[in-house]
């Protein structure tokens, strides 16, 4: 059984997953930084619009970040 193509596809998939995880962590860090740096009305909604995440997801990110500070 030749699994060369299967192995290559699995490697590509793992690399893509790792890249996605890294990008998600970077985006999360930027969300936290932006929202901590402003108290403008509607900032959370603007971040949600720009990221494609819901306002509830943004709130969860901010709660988790606040918990990590302690």
Image (spheres, grey):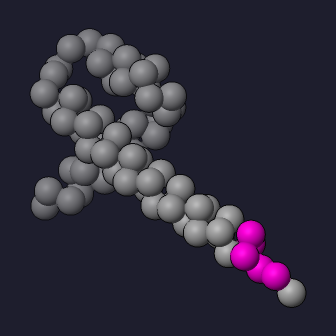
In the picture, residue 68 is in which quadrant?
A: bottom left
The magenta span reads 2-6
18 above or below 47?
below
Write the residue at 46% across / 61% down: 18
Q: Say if the magenta span includes residue 5.
A: yes
Quarter of the N terminus within the rendering = bottom right
Q: For this rendering, which residue is in front, 48 or 14?
A: 14
4 above or below 30?
below
Residue 49 x %, y %: 46, 20
Outermost residue to the right? 1
59 sits to left or right of 34: right
Quarter of the C terminus within the rendering = bottom left
In the picture, residue 41 is in which quadrant?
A: top left
4 sits to left or right of 70: right
37 above or below 42?
below
Q: Say if the magenta span includes residue 57.
A: no
Residue 28 x %, y %: 33, 43
Residue 10 visible to the viewer: yes
In the picture, residue 51 is in which quadrant?
A: top left
Residue 63 visible to the viewer: no
Q: Main secondary structure of the magenta part?
A: helix
44 sits to left or right of 19: left
Write the residue at 72% across / 76% down: 4
Number of numbered discs visible in the structure rendering: 0
Outermost residue to the top? 41
Residue 17 x %, y %: 53, 59
């Amino acid at each position: 059984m030749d699994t060369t193509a299967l192995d290559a596809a699995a490697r590509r998939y793992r690399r893509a997953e790792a890249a996605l995880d890294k990008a998600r962590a970077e985006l999360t860090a930027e969300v936290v930084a932006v929202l901590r740096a402003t108290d403008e009305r509607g900032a959370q909604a603007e971040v949600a619009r720009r990221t494609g995440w819901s306002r509830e997801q943004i709130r969860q990110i901010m709660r988790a970040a606040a918990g990590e500070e302690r």
